[in-house]
Image (cartoon, rainbow, N blue to C red):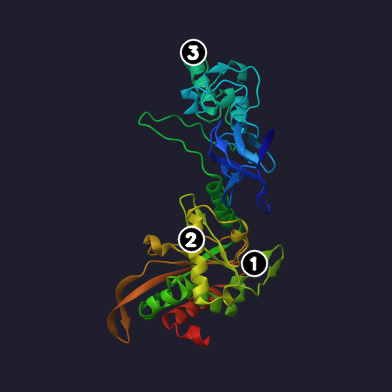
Amino acid sequence: MKVDIVVPTLGESVTEATVAKWLKRVGDSVAADEPLVELETDKVSLEVPAPSAGKLSEILASDGADVLVGAVLGNLDETSTTVGQPEPTQEEEGSSVVSPKLVPSQTLSPAVRKLVDENSLDPAKILATGAKGQITKGDVLAFMEKIADAKPASASQPLAKAAAKPVTEAPQPVGELPIRTEDPRGEERVRMSRLRQIIAQRLKQAQNTAAILTTYNECRMDTLMALRSEYRDAFEKKHGARLGFLSFFVKAAIIALKEIPAVNAEIYGDEVIYKNYYDIGVAVGTSQGLVVPIVRDADKMSFAEIENTIADYGRRARDGKLTIEEMTGGTFTISNGGVYGSLMSMPILNPPQSGILGMHTIQKRPIAINGNVEIASMMYLALSYDHRIVDGREAVTFLVRMKEVLEDPQRLLIDV
């Protein structure tokens, strides 16, 4: 019996995903709940498990295809598709590719259908080399190149390569991307991941919507570094967590947010929503892009709880295992560009939040103290804020308050 492999519910407000890669080939035997295919959304990557044990009999959405929630990705044969059929050849066992053949009619994957429709191609004329005789994107591109090579030089311009829109003699419509010619020195076209596309959209949305302004200050880190060095081993032994700087910055930020509530607020239409809870987003860089998991109710957490939460988020972010709920919401964000060596930067808001703190690398440099020059460990702090809701005075006061707490971390113990 055939069982459909469908796109699961992806979370609140997420209706579409991209097929990142299939983990199994057609004909592979799979166990129930064994991962079959990896999907990528604008927030997370997730694996779709096998609904039951059997053999993967058909792939309907190939790598790179955009799919909606509930769409059928492929089929699983619970009773084995090889019963009563000849055994596959050695060549077929090592690959899902079958002998090329013409396919008069079939269900095309979204990516292939898009390419065929854009270039007005007849699928029946395309040699299919995919699993189960499916037409792959490579088959379409090869067919397009064959057509282009067969056209005389006097003919109209050849079809564009890859997934670019076909070249025509008509004027280019307003808003269309310019046609790119291939550089003979070599280029590689790689489709942006869904996460990267959404990051780009939201960063541009923040710049288009909010009145972003950034204010800077610097913080002397010597006392905090000495405190961390003194208690690091005992802290790790007791709590099983590494004592980092982020927990101190989260605690200091919460003190400043309580005193300057506008930085913890958001604009909703013609209203300002002031939030009396503190869900702090911590930006984590991954190979797929930047993600911001949320440390919820951080004001109620101990240093150890904050450190353990951040460490867990970091590990799972790099493995693509964060859930959508863990990255939804947030009232304020902290981004630590210092781990990459950044000396100073201007962070961009994470809408609809009104503030984001940028941490930077710690650098020893000379500073003037009471008329004397001393070598100190210094860090630049940057606060980007929405000037529609946060005034310059409030932003500067916020950073000064954080500076006071971080330079004298004993204030965290007695809340002054």
- State the residue position of label 3: 150
Query: What residue appears at the point 57 percent right and 34 percent down from the top-left corner?
Result: 62
Q: Earlier in the sequence, mark 3 or mark 2?
A: 3
Q: Label 3 sits on what residue type? A: Ala
Q: Label 1 sits on what residue type? A: Glu
When the figure is inspected, residue 58 is found, relative to residue 127, above or below; the finding is: below
Query: What residue appears at the point 49 percent right and 83 percent down from the top-left corner?
Result: 412
Decide which of 49, 44 is in the foreground and name it. Answer: 49
Q: Of all residues shown, which one is farthest toward the right?
A: 270
Query: What residue appears at the point 50 percent right and 80 percent down from the top-left corner?
Result: 401
Decide which of 285, 54 is in the foreground and name it. Answer: 54
- Mark drawn on residue 266: 1
Disc 3 to disc 2, C-alpha distance: 53 Å
Query: What residue appears at the point 62 percent right and 17 percent down from the top-left corner?
Result: 124
Q: Measuring from the top left, give residue 66's x and y in whole percent.
A: 61, 39
Q: Measuring from the top left, give residue 237's x and y in whole percent.
A: 42, 75
- State the residue position of label 2: 314
Q: Earlier in the sequence, mark 3 or mark 1?
A: 3
Q: Measuring from the top left, give residue 332's x and y in whole percent.
A: 57, 68
Residue 386 in view: no
Q: Secondary structure at mark 1?
A: strand
**Mark 2 crowd level (few <14, some 14–19, many ≥20, 10 Å Cα):** many
- Mark drawn on residue 237: none
Residue 255 in view: yes
Decide which of 23, 120 is in the foreground and name it. Answer: 23
Disc 3 to disc 1, C-alpha distance: 60 Å
